[in-house]
Image: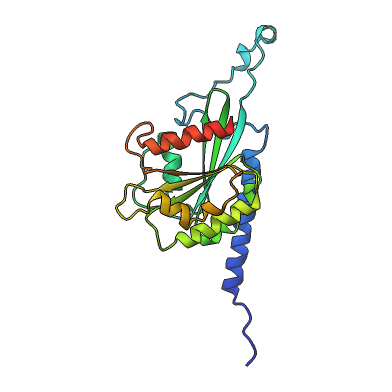
Amino acid sequence: MAPRSLSPLVLALGGAAAVLGSVLFILWKAYFGRGRERRWDRGDGWWGEEPARLPEWDEWDPEDEEDEEPALEELEQREVLVLGLDGSGKSTFLRVLSGKPPLEGHIPTWGFNSVRLPTKDFEVDLLEIGGSQNLRFYWKEFVNEVDVLVFMVDSADRLRLPWARQELHKLLDKDPDLPVVVVANKQDLSEAMSMVELQQELGLHVVDSQREVFLLGASIAPAGPGFEDPGTVHIWRLLLELLS
């Protein structure tokens, strides 16, 4: 019997995955391009500021332009990529940092989420890409575009830890100079692996000692305004140090 050809459904799914990867990369370039304009409307309640009102035609006086001070220089941007298997807590991490309320139940990310956080000297752009199997193929396309990689791990998901290790080392091999912060999330769960176990199971003990790879424990959950989990505070401070 002659072998069957690929069904139209399989071809369509493959094409959709390729298109999704291309769209993600284009959006990355548009959103995180150097010297870009601000991404979102500042009046949407995210930062609590109202958009500036444009002057009416009869209010405009060209002589006023001469008295205006030059616009302030925009802050530099720093890019952080947040990756990890689905369910590891990536979206919750971004929501905690931005002070947003928790989502109801577990909602996997089918594309990407992003957050921009201002600091005194620069703005930090964090991009999360979904961790489902069909999206992991595209992770490596973004690694060389960022300043720091955050890799989230579910400390209690022993069954999928080998997959997490495999994906992490693919990323480590992709850019040997990229600082990496491995977050051992859900340390509050009784079945969570210890930090020593995770270091061994993730193969961090074999990573070049000269490379900047950090393993931090956390129990990330939006429990109110600000950073409630000390581990989250530690992660944020480390990111600022690496980005400075």
| 187 sits to left or right of 112 | left
Q: Quadrant of residue 93?
A: top left
Q: Is residue 25 above or below residue 223?
A: below
Residue at point 47%, 55% (across, down): 200
Q: Residue furthest left?
A: 190
Q: Quadrant of residue 149?
A: top right
Q: Is residue 153 visible?
A: yes
Residue 202 drawn at (x, y percent)? 49, 55
Quarter of the image that includes the C terminus: top right
Residue 51 drawn at (x, y percent)? 52, 24
Residue at point 54%, 21% (across, down): 52
Residue 121 drawn at (x, y percent)? 57, 24
| 132 sits to left or right of 144 | left
Q: Residue furthest bottom?
A: 1
89 vs 36, nearest the viewer: 89
- By what rule are the colours in the image chosen? rainbow
Residue 156 drawn at (x, y percent)? 37, 55
Q: Is residue 9 above or below residue 244?
A: below
Residue at point 47%, 28% (across, down): 47
Quarter of the image that includes the N terminus: bottom right
Q: Is residue 88 visible?
A: no
Number of disc labels = 0
122 vs 54, nearest the viewer: 122
